Image (spheres, helix red, strand yellow):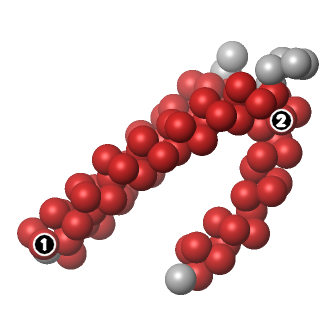
Amino acid sequence: MALRAAGALFEPMSLDLQNEAAPAGSEAAQLSCNAMVMEFTAAVLNPAFGAAADAGTACALLLGAAACGIGLLLFLAGTKR
């Protein structure tokens, strides 16, 4: 529940940063693409977390750590451009 609340609090700031980073005139398209990527990621990870949790807490935590690590690598690759 706390993670949902934190996400709701930081979403406006995140959208503002994305708007500033997008080229002029394409902010809406950029935000739409970002939203689709986030929804796709959630659609893939949510069932995967459920299956991992059924296998055990350690599996779910390892999946979470792997997802965070991949996210960090993608973030760093995106900020180098």
Look at the numbered disc 1 and give the secondary structure of its residue: helix
Is 78 positioned to the left or the right of 60 in the image? Answer: right
Residue positioned 20% across, 71% down in the render = 53
Residue positioned 87% across, 33% down in the render = 20
Residue 72 appearing in the image: no
Q: Is the residue marked by circle 1 packed among few (<14), some (14-19), or many (20+) residues within 10 Å? A: few
Look at the numbered disc 2 and give the secondary structure of its residue: helix
Query: Closer to the camera, 42 or 79?
Result: 42
Q: Is the residue marked by circle 2 packed among few (<14), some (14-19), or many (20+) residues within 10 Å? A: some
Q: Earlier in the sequence, mark 2 or mark 1?
A: 2
Amino acid on which the number 1 mark rests in the picture: Asp
Identify the residue at the far left of this view: 55
Q: Is residue 52 above or below residue 34?
A: below
Look at mark 1 in the image and give the residue it sits on: 54
Residue 13 appearing in the image: yes
Look at mark 2 in the image and give the residue it sits on: 19
**Disc 2 to disc 1, C-alpha distance:** 39 Å
Q: Which quarter of the rendered picture does the C terminus lie within?
A: top right
State which quadrant residue 59 falls in. Answer: bottom left
Image location (x, y in percent) of residue 14: 76, 50
Image location (x, y in percent) of residue 45: 33, 52
Amino acid on which the number 2 mark rests in the picture: Asn
Query: Closer to the camera, 29 or 4?
Result: 29
Image location (x, y in percent) of residue 16: 85, 45
Image location (x, y in percent) of residue 11: 73, 58
Q: Is residue 72 above or below residue 3?
A: above
Residue positioned 58% across, 81% down in the render = 2
Residue positioned 82% across, 54% down in the render = 13
Is 81 positioned to the left or the right of 59 in the image? Answer: right
State which quadrant residue 77 falls in. Answer: top right
